[in-house]
Amino acid sequence: MDIKDIIKPENLVYGSSKLLIDTIMHYCPGCTHGVIHKLIAELIEEMGLQEKTIGVAPVGCSVLAYNYIDIDWQEAAHGRAPAVATGVARLNPDKFVFTYQGDGDLASIGTGEIIHACNRGENFLVVFINNGIYGMTGGQMAPTTIEGMVTSTTPGGRDIGLNGFPLKMTDLVAQLPGTSYVSRQAAHTAAAVRKCKRALKKGIQNVLDKKGTSFIEVVSTCNSGWKMTPVQANKWMEDNMIPYYPLGDLKDTDKKENVTGN
Amino acid sequence: MKGNEVLAEAAIRCGCDGYFGYPITPQSEVMETLMEREPWNETGMVVLQAESEVASINMLYGAAGTGKRVMTSSSSPGISLMTEGISYIAGAELPCLVVNVQRGGPGLGTIQPSQADYFQAVKGGGHGDYKMIVLAPSSVQEMNDFVDLAFELAFKYRNPAMILTDGAIGQMMEKVQLSDYKKRLTEEEIIGKWGDWATTGKPASRERNIVTSLELDSNKNELNNRRFQEKYKRMEAEEQRYEAIRCEDAEYIFVAFGTSARVCEKAVDLGREKGHKIGLLRPITLFPFPKDIIGQLAKNAKGFLSIEMNAGQMIEDIKLSIYEAGLVRRVEHFGRMGGIIPNPAEVLEAMEKMFIQKSE
């Protein structure tokens, strides 16, 4: 059987989203950004939101996110995406607005902006990629770097006495009354990707329903920054990151019982 | 009405879509007035108190990126915090209005009026080669008039505009003729006017719009910079604004803007009574600086005295204007600093000592 006999429309079981732009991504092989971009593109397409979506890209590895998803985008200054998105959403209340931010952007330089946007209950979705490192600038320590983790600015491993504790932003924003749905996900296995997509969909729906801020963390790898192969990085994340950043919903105001355990 | 209150009223009346701000003396009445007026009930204008000046300016970026008419106001230390955002706004070529009701610096300085942010306003302020359109009102009436003018210029050039005023004009009460109401643009009108760049949501009919100041390809980034510089040159060619008072036969000319210009206007009257042939050139646009008129006046005038509430900043632009006109004239500076407004007598005395008595 020739390959052309197999590649027929009737045999198609899976395709890439039309909103995912057909170009070479700048992300390293093994990086989770591409998977999460794909999920967002799929959801915007499936939910028919292209004409009303405005994405806000961060500074960090995903600074060029606007090259990959075929929607209107704004590129924010480092850490300021929640303020930019506030400006967009407040003046365009019927649009679907989301930010896409890494952990250096959201959990370090932009801590003030994210806390206050979530606390005001700004009506947008925050997608927070936590890989415990500054990927773009060459693998320096992030606020989310876990204890003992080696980075280029913690060559002996993160020392709590010197650097303080890894910051759990998602737990923090779950406490704020302005957030409606707060969840921590991953995207390293097929099952995790499916769960992640469900969480993102719920976050988007909450924004469409004007329920306030939805916040979805995706615990991710940075195999280049971690100096590992993609497979090793996934294993390391499962063994080390996820125990500190456990997956699941932290808050869902649709449910009577707040799922936050703390 | 107070100058600061007029800024708020003018914003509502000129069809402003949104205001984002953070309290700081001596301009807090702008947001207070807006919150009391509740324009969201009247025109739909959004007013939001942000958590910081850094957040305010980035909210402005986001809203301006959707083609809306948006503004913020602050005072000197707050403007310093905003300069990062202003640089991004200039780099992304977004129109918006930033009002600086200046106070004395450096640092926390004082809450009294000052003009020490001239360099910051007209030379860029943040990182990178950029310029803002800078308007300098010298009366409460101009606080009203310049809000709409600033927006018109900002949108004409897709560039941030600044109203550079100070605590004196912000706090001062004068009679004012408020502008008539202008309707806010509808979503359709925004798409019609700014649809080629504003992020209003991508329809199938156009390419996606991206608001960004990032261009990693140096060749392309140089082209972007060339485009910006050409735009600033166009502003210099088309938008120089000034008021010339008793300059026709003047041998010596004060150059002053804003509050200083009010002081100098009085000093000109006092000097004329004493028989001095003096006049006042009041720059209204600080960028573009009204260098053409200064070059023309330099043909007949013997000297220029820059009166500023700072250590001497605008004087550099006066000297450059005369140099570019191919002339040589003496230019001096007299200023008060730290929040002090000079009085007409000391300004006139400076003119007499530095120029008139020396020429006799």
Image (cartoon, coloured by chain):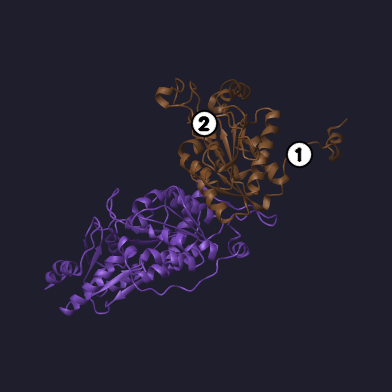
Chain colours: A brown, B purple
Q: Could one spot residue A22 in this view of the protein? A: no
* Circle 1 residue: A15
* SS class, disc 1: loop
Name the residue at 53% across, 52% down: A87
Q: CA distance from mark 2 to mark 1?
A: 35 Å
Above/below status of A66 relative to B133: above
Q: Position of residue B13 (x, y in %)?
A: 48, 68
**Foreground tag (2 vs 1):** 2
Q: Position of residue B109 (x, y in %)?
A: 27, 51
Name the foreground residue: A55 vs A208. A208
Name the mark on residue B279.
Answer: none
Question: Counting other residues with Cα less than 10 Å from the Cα at mark 1, is it few (<14), some (14-19), or many (20 or more)?
Answer: few
* SS class, disc 2: loop
Q: Position of residue A72 (x, y in %)?
A: 62, 51
Please state, as top left, top right, bottom left or bottom right, where the N terminus of chain B lies in the image. bottom left
Name the foreground residue: A180 vs B330. A180
Name the foreground residue: A41 vs A125. A125
Q: Which of the 4 image quadrants contains residue A229?
A: top right
Above/below status of A156 relative to B39: above
* Circle 2 residue: A168
Q: Position of residue B25 (x, y in %)?
A: 34, 55
Amino acid at the residue labelled 1: Gly
Tell which subunit mark 2 falls on: A
Q: Which of the 4 image quadrants contains residue B277?
A: bottom left
Above/below status of B236 relative to B274: above
For marks 2 and 1 on the same chain, the one whose residue lies earlier in the sequence: 1
Amino acid at the residue labelled 2: Lys
Name the foreground residue: B323 vs A126. A126
Name of the residue lying farthest toward the front: A256
Please state, as top left, top right, bottom left or bottom right, where the C terminus of chain B lies in the image. bottom left
Tell which subunit mark 1 falls on: A
